[in-house]
Image (cartoon, rainbow, N blue to C red):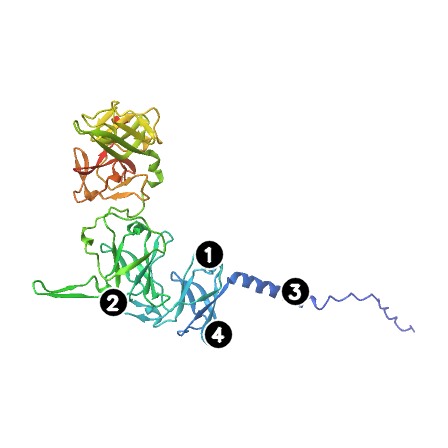
C-alpha cells in the first residue's frame, strides 16, 4: 500500500510593483493642453467690432476681404451701457495683418440708392462683415468701430492727394461723388461733415496720384451737382446737367489757370465755389499727368543760369539784358543763341556774359550755331556735362517734359500741341509761356531721352532738337 501522493510545493515570488495609476490621465491632460494651445495659435487673433446695429448677423457669419472668408463671427454681445453691439471676430492666421490701425469694418446688407445697389447677395444669404485693411506697417489694434455704410470704393494711395474743401452747405454732395478735371474722373469725395463751429461744411476729397500735379495753389474748385435752369428772351430755356450721377450724389470739378501756382501738400484747404470761374474756358496750363519719365535723371544738374547784358543803340544807348538757361556739354555750354551770342552792332565795351557764375568773353566766336541754338566753348563746364548716351538726335514729335532748375515740377507738353517744322517742333500759338522757361531742357516721353531745348521767342514757342554736331 502506497502512501498519499506528495503535493507539489508552491513557489513563492515577490509581487511586481504596479504602475502609477495617475500616469495615463496625466498624459491625456498634457495631450489635450497641447491640442488646445495648437488650436489657439492656429486660429489667429480676435478683434472686437462695435456697431450701432447687428443688422441680422449671426454666430458663424463670415468676415470677408476681396470676396474671400478671412474670419468668422464668434460672439454677439451688448455693451454694458446697451448702446452698442460688440461683434467678436476670430481671424484666420493669414489675416492677422488686418489688426492694424486704419482698418475699416462694416456690415454688408442690402442697400438701395438712386445711383447704386449694394449687398444684393445678402437678400437670400446671410449678412456678413467686410473689411478694408489699414497700412501694413501700422500699429496693432484689436478694437474697431464699424462704419455706418460701406466706404467709398476709391482705393486710397499714399502718393495721392487729400484735400479739404469748405462750402456754405453740403448741397447734394455725398461720399463717393466724383472729382473731375475737364470731365475726366481724377478722384472722389471721401466724406462730408459739419465744421467744428457748425458755420460751414467740410468736404474731404481725394485726387489720385497720376493727377495730383493738376492741383495748384490757385486751383478753382466748384460744385457740379444739381440742375441749372436759365431762361433768356434771346436764347430761350437752357438746362445744364453735368451727369445723371452728379444730379443724385453731386460732383466736384476743378481747373487751374494757365499761370499755375505752386504744388500743394496733403490737407490744403480750398473754398468750394458754386460755379466755374468766368475765365475757365481760357485756362490751358501745361501740367504733368502720370509719372514723370526721365525725372530720375535729375536734369537740373546739367543746367546753368545764363545772363547776357549789353548796350543797344548808336546815338542813345540803353542797357538791355537777356536771361535763360544753358545745358553743359563735354566741350562747352549749349543754349539759346540769343543768350550766347551778342546781337549785331553791339559794342563789346558794355557787354558781359555770365553763365553759372562764370564770366565768359561775350565777343568770342561761338563754336556752333543751328536752329536757334549756339555752343560756346568753356575751359570747364559750369555744371555736369550731359552724356550723349542720354540724348536722342532727330527724334519724332512726341509728348515732352521741359525742365528748369527753379521749378519744382516739369512743364508737360502734349504732342497734340506740337507741329514739326524746319525749325524744330512749333507749339500751338495758343500755348502761352513765360520767359522763365527759355532754354529749358526737354525730355521726350517716347524715346525716354533728352531731345532738345525749349525756346521762348517773340514769334512763339518751339523745341529746337539736339544736333549731333554740337557734341
Q: Nearer the viewer, residue 369 or 420?
A: 369
| Residue receiving disc 3 | 27
Say whether disc 1 or disc 2 marks the residue closer to the N-terminus.
1
**Proximity of marks 1 and 3: CB atoms separated by less than 8 Å:** no
| Residue drawn at point x = 46 percent, y = 77 percent | 82
Side of 134 where 389 appears, left or right: left
Image quadrant in which you'd find residue 172? bottom left
| Residue drawn at point x = 26 percent, y = 69 percent | 114
Residue 115, image x and y in percent? Answer: 26, 67
Say whether disc 4 or disc 2 marks the residue closer to the N-terminus.
4
Side of 212 where 314 appears, left or right: left
Q: Secondary structure at mark 1?
A: loop
Q: Secondary structure at mark 2?
A: helix
Say whether disc 1 or disc 3 marks the residue closer to the N-terminus.
3
Q: Which numbered marker is on residue 138?
A: 1
Q: Nearer the viewer, mark 1 or mark 3?
A: 1
| Residue receiving disc 2 | 248
Q: Quadrant of the C terminus?
A: top left
Q: Secondary structure at mark 3?
A: helix
Q: Residue furthest front?
A: 316
Alpha carbons under labels 1 and 3: distance apart:
43 Å
Amino acid at each position: 500500500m502506497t502512501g498519499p501522493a506528495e503535493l507539489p510545493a508552491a513557489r513563492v515570488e515577490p509581487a511586481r510593483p504596479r504602475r502609477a495609476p495617475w500616469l495615463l490621465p496625466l498624459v491625456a491632460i498634457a495631450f489635450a493642453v497641447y491640442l488646445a494651445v495648437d488650436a489657439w495659435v492656429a486660429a489667429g487673433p480676435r478683434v472686437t467690432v462695435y456697431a450701432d446695429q447687428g443688422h441680422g448677423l449671426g454666430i458663424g457669419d463670415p468676415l470677408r476681404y476681396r470676396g474671400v472668408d478671412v474670419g468668422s463671427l464668434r460672439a454677439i454681445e451688448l455693451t454694458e451701457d446697451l448702446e452698442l453691439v460688440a461683434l467678436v471676430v476670430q481671424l484666420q492666421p493669414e489675416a492677422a495683418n488686418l489688426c492694424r490701425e486704419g482698418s475699416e469694418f462694416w456690415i454688408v446688407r442690402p442697400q438701395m440708392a438712386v445711383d447704386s445697389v449694394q449687398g444684393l447677395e445678402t437678400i437670400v444669404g446671410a449678412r456678413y462683415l467686410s473689411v478694408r485693411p489699414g497700412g501694413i506697417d501700422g500699429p496693432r489694434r484689436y478694437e474697431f468701430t464699424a462704419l455706418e455704410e460701406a466706404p467709398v470704393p476709391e482705393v486710397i494711395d499714399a502718393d495721392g492727394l487729400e484735400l479739404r474743401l469748405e462750402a456754405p452747405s453740403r448741397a447734394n454732395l455725398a461720399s463717393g461723388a466724383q472729382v473731375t478735371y475737364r470731365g475726366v474722373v481724377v478722384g472722389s469725395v471721401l466724406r462730408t461733415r459739419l465744421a467744428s463751429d457748425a458755420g460751414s461744411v467740410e468736404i474731404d476729397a481725394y485726387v489720385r496720384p497720376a493727377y495730383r500735379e493738376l492741383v495748384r495753389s490757385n486751383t478753382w474748385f466748384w460744385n457740379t451737382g444739381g440742375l441749372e435752369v436759365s431762361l433768356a428772351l434771346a436764347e430761350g430755356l437752357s438746362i445744364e446737367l453735368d451727369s445723371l450721377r452728379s444730379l443724385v450724389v453731386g460732383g466736384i470739378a476743378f481747373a487751374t489757370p494757365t499761370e499755375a501756382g505752386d504744388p500743394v501738400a496733403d490737407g490744403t484747404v480750398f473754398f468750394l465755389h458754386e460755379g466755374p470761374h468766368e475765365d475757365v474756358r481760357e485756362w490751358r496750363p501745361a501740367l504733368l499727368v502720370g509719372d514723370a519719365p526721365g525725372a530720375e535723371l535729375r536734369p537740373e544738374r546739367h543746367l546753368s543760369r545764363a545772363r547776357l547784358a549789353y548796350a543797344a543803340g548808336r546815338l542813345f544807348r540803353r542797357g538791355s539784358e537777356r536771361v535763360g538757361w544753358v545745358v553743359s556739354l563735354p566741350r562747352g555750354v549749349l543754349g539759346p543763341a540769343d543768350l550766347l551770342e551778342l546781337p549785331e552792332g553791339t559794342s563789346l565795351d558794355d557787354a558781359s556774359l555770365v553763365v553759372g557764375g562764370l564770366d565768359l568773353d561775350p565777343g568770342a566766336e561761338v563754336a556752333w550755331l543751328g536752329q536757334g541754338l549756339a555752343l560756346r566753348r568753356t575751359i570747364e563746364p559750369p555744371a555736369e556735362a550731359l552724356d550723349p548716351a542720354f540724348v536722342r538726335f532727330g527724334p519724332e514729335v512726341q509728348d515732352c517734359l521741359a525742365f528748369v532748375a527753379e521749378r519744382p515740377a516739369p512743364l508737360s507738353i502734349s504732342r497734340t500741341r506740337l507741329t514739326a517744322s524746319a525749325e524744330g517742333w512749333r507749339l500751338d500759338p495758343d500755348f502761352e509761356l513765360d520767359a522763365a522757361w527759355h532754354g529749358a531742357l526737354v525730355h521726350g516721353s517716347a524715346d525716354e531721352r533728352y531731345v532738345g531745348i525749349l525756346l521762348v521767342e517773340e514769334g512763339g514757342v518751339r523745341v529746337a532738337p539736339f544736333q549731333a554736331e554740337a557734341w
